[in-house]
């Protein structure tokens, strides 16, 4: 379902560049864009594989660039509101990744490559090594969380799993944002130390 | 992008249970994106003007639609902007736009020197109409006929349904890469006009 379906006021606010509308659309789409950037994709009929970006900093830069382009004034005004938004957004991401691959020399393409809407449904599989490392680190993270008290576990759920803002978490936990920030740092430090003690020097 | 401790971001991803961006990363990116793209918050008096402008625009649209066929549209810029009209031919005669028909472009370039058209099919496929086949660039308009009919037509061999045709007028012929970049990121394009037209293929 497109983010604008049945929501004309959101489309109008998007075109005006209102922060709340842009935030809503960003929140609705950012995970999918991030996954595409991390995993890469396949242009099936052309048998071309565009690899994902492993470096987290580069992932962030690319995701940011996708939304900067999609939210630029001319892009907002040019979006017709009839075409589905998701394929339009993912095409921007795919095109950026192709350009990035070409510039870095990782991707050598002959002729024309035009990303298509359905390519987003063909993410590349994660390498077995990466998957194993992620599973192992997640298992240790769960072990660490099991040692936390009930309040800290609730914080992990609200802030990291449900991805609520610090202000929302503060309100839900009947505390201040300052205390939320302190708790966030404490939990990160605790996990970092836990992982180091288990032999992960640079988590 | 602000300077962030990369290990914090990794920890956030682990705590969130997703290998993609953690909550702090998402927030940092959003801040940067809004700083670069969001409009200033509307003042109260401006908010009153918006519905008024919408009503005015709606009235203008009604007047324009009454005076034009549904498949003709004019780019922003009013009468000085280039425009394009889509029509279809079957066996050399004007006909409804149905599968197998030839799609013909009648142009009013108004100073533009090249023309391209790319269609989005109902199934999401992108179809190059002009340049088509082995053409490397958009069509030059120096030899456009007096009636404005482009000497290249596209056969409608895609699925039936509602298409969007993106017509691109430019000052010089553009390669497919340049056209793609312009359509994906209109903010990067200068010296060109893009007109979006609905097309129903029956």
Image (cartoon, coloured by chain):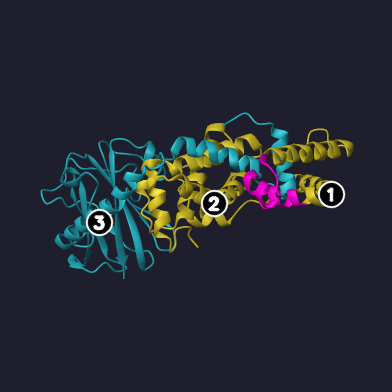
Chain colours: A yellow, B cyan
Q: Is residue A74 visible?
A: yes
Which residue in the structure is indicated by mark 3? B55
Residue B162 horizontal side relative to residue A134, left or right: left
Residue B131 at x, y = what percent? Answer: 32, 47
Q: Which residues are magenta?
A: A154-177
Single out the mark in the foreground, 3 or 2: 3
| Mark 3: secondary structure | helix
**Who's the residue at 44% across and 43% down the image?**
A71
Q: Are marks 3 and 1 in contact (CB under 8 Å)?
A: no
- Report the Cα–Cα distance between label 1 and label 2: 33 Å
Which residue in the structure is indicated by mark 1? A149
Marks 1/2 same chain: yes
Of A86 and A165, the residue lying toward us: A165
**Who's the residue at 51% across and 45% down the image?**
A93
Could you tell me which chain the residue with mark 1 belongs to?
A
**Who's the residue at 62% across and 28% down the image?**
B3
Asked where in the image residue B72 lies, by quadrant, the reply is: bottom left
Mark 3 surroundings: few (<14), some (14-19) or many (≥20) residues within 10 A: few
The question of residue A169 being in magenta is answered with yes
Of A22 and A58, the residue lying toward us: A22
Which residue in the structure is indicated by mark 2? A29
| Mark 2: secondary structure | helix
């Amino acid at each position: 379902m497109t983010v604008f379906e049945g929501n004309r006021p959101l489309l109008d606010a998007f075109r005006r560049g209102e922060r709340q509308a842009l935030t809503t659309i960003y929140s609705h789409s950012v995970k999918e864009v991030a996954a595409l950037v991390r995993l890469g994709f396949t242009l099936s009929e052309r048998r071309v594989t565009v690899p994902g970006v492993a470096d987290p900093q580069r992932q962030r830069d690319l995701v940011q660039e996708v939304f900067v382009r999609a939210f630029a004034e001319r892009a907002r005004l040019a979006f017709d509101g009839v075409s589905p938004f998701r394929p339009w957004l993912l095409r921007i991401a795919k095109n950026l990744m192709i350009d990035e691959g070409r510039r870095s020399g990782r991707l050598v393409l002959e002729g024309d490559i035009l990303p298509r809407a359905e390519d987003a449904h063909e993410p590349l599989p994660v390498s077995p090594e990466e998957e194993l490392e992620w599973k192992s680190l997640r298992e240790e993270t769960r072990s660490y969380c099991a040692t936390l008290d009930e309040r800290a576990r609730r914080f992990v759920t609200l802030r990291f799993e449900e991805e609520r803002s610090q202000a929302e978490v503060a309100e839900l936990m009947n505390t201040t944002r300052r205390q939320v920030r302190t708790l966030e740092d404490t939990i990160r430090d605790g996990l970092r130390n836990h992982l180091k003690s288990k032999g992960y020097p640079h988590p | 992008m602000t300077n962030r401790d990369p290990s914090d971001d990794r920890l956030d991803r682990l705590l969130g249970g997703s290998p993609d961006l953690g909550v702090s990363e998402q927030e940092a990116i959003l801040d940067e994106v809004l700083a670069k793209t969001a409009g200033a918050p509307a003042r109260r008096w401006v908010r009153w003007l918006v519905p008024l402008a919408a009503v005015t625009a709606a009235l203008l649209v009604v007047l324009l639609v009454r005076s034009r066929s549904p498949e003709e549209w004019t780019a922003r810029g009013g009468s000085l902007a280039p425009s394009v009209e889509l029509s279809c031919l079957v066996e050399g005669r004007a006909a409804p736009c149905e599968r197998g028909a030839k799609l013909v472009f009648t142009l009013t370039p108004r100073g533009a020197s090249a023309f391209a058209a790319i269609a989005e099919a109902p199934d999401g496929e992108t179809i190059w109409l002009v340049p088509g086949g082995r053409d490397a660039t958009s069509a030059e308009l120096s030899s456009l006929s007096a009636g404005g009919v482009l000497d290249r037509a596209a056969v409608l061999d895609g699925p039936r349904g509602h298409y969007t045709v993106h017509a691109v007028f430019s000052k010089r012929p553009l390669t497919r890469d340049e056209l793609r970049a312009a359509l994906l990121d209109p903010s990067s394009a200068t010296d060109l006009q893009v007109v979006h037209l609905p097309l129903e293929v029956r």
